[in-house]
Image: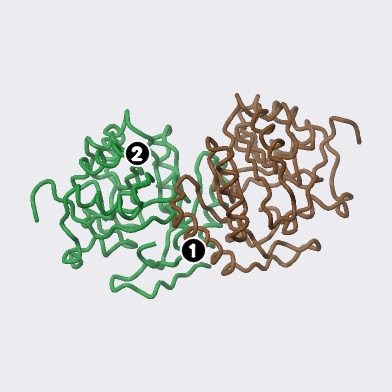
Chain colours: A green, B brown
Amino acid sequence: MSGPDIIRISEIFGPTIQGEGALIGVPTVFVRTGGCDFRCQWCDSLHAVDSRFRADWRPMSAAEVWAEVETLSGGVPLTVSLSGGNPAIQPLGDLIRLGRDRGYRFALETQGSVSRDWFADLDMLVLSPKPPSSGMLTNWDDVAACIAAASGGGRTVLKCIVFDEADYAFARDAAARFPNLPMYLQPGNHTPPGPAESDGAIDTDGIMARMRWLVDRATADRWFDAVALPQLHVLIWGNKRGV
Amino acid sequence: MSGPDIIRISEIFGPTIQGEGALIGVPTVFVRTGGCDFRCQWCDSLHAVDSRFRADWRPMSAAEVWAEVETLSGGVPLTVSLSGGNPAIQPLGDLIRLGRDRGYRFALETQGSVSRDWFADLDMLVLSPKPPSSGMLTNWDDVAACIAAASGGGRTVLKCIVFDEADYAFARDAAARFPNLPMYLQPGNHTPPGPAESDGAIDTDGIMARMRWLVDRATADRWFDAVALPQLHVLIWGNKRGV
């Protein structure tokens, strides 16, 4: 199956809870698309990014994806999280319309490199510009275009991964550029799953130490507008996939 | 110092992040009052509840409490969490007005046994009716009176601690009684600090196992309106006080 309306799917799973950011704890079905225009050094979803895994990605129509979401949720409306990879490079407008007609809510998380007109149909757009530790460069005009595309729709929020002082400065800069958007800070996970699927072992103590540092850092600056949250799913389930 | 306007204070600390519920991750100064009309079996704040610790509670005026909050936050507005004990048995109306005049936001957490007219001045009222495992009985008329007192003010949300199947059924009943209020589910902490202040040792694995059970339980019921969150501060800092 191919064509402009075909979505490349890495995995569809849930319901479980959203583990991070503004919707933390909210029951969610995840639709993870395959393919990404970025290659972050600490990517925790390489199986949905690296073209090595392309054979695992299923080409699906919006109706086929929707049918799986509906089955997993038993037809009871909930939040659907569109993630990746970069889900913005996939044709997701039809899927969002199908679900919203049935009372489902849609959140999408992207680095902000590609904007789409259907961002305006989302309930939440999570923009996660990649900090220096990722090895990527952020084009702020592209991020601004995403914000503009989503305006008139649901909420737009920023989420920044913070590993170190340089990342923290990047997050402060991002917040200063877009002062009207809520900011979520997230300590980086330095033990993401390996490309061959690790056993899920994580350095919880290390992540928690970074979390404590991040809280201390932000409160010392009296940066009280930023919300700080770790990746809860990693703490609860480790780096296991499908939860 | 005594009199009707005197607040009994157990501790004032922060800024740190709120560790649980609707404001999880939000920078917060905590004002914990002393004294409680309940005696929950698993109380994690006995130092603010048991009259054994009454000598540690400071009688303070609203202006004195406000001065400490302002010093801790450097005069930069943030969220102030009023907790206890049961803060609803204290005269907190003046404190809330003092802070709100300066741009601060106020959340209050209570079991819902005592309603006050100044609930309408809160930015968030967290009603946490106590489940069967607490050994307490909930009077739903009292809870409804709290909701009515806060109406016209900020948001009111429900939070239920869940240790077991009976607590889960209690939470479902609470949600059914007040279907318009957001519901937050929280796995119980069976290793709260002892009255003599333990070393902060907690059974993280046990809490996380209960969290996984809770997520599975709620999603199996397709209860997608409830948000499930553990006590993040316990995971980050253990049972240590003052963070």
Point out residue A208 in the picture as x, y percentages from the top left corner: 53, 62
User: Could you tell me the amino acid type at mark 1?
Assistant: Leu
Q: Which residue is mark 1?
A: A235
Q: Is residue B100 above or below residue A59?
A: above
Find disc 2 in the rendering and name its residue. Answer: A103
The quadrant where residue A30 appears: bottom left
Q: Is residue A164 visible?
A: no
Label 2 marks a residue whose chain is A
Chain letter behind tag 1:
A
Q: CA distance from mark 1 to mark 2?
A: 31 Å
Q: Residue visible at 75% across and 43% down?
A: B86
- Depth check: A40 or A121 in front? A121
Left or right of B8 in this view: B26: left
Quadrant placement of the N terminus of chain A = bottom left
Q: Are marks 1 and 2 on the same chain?
A: yes
Q: With B206 as the anchor, is A67 left or right in this view?
A: left
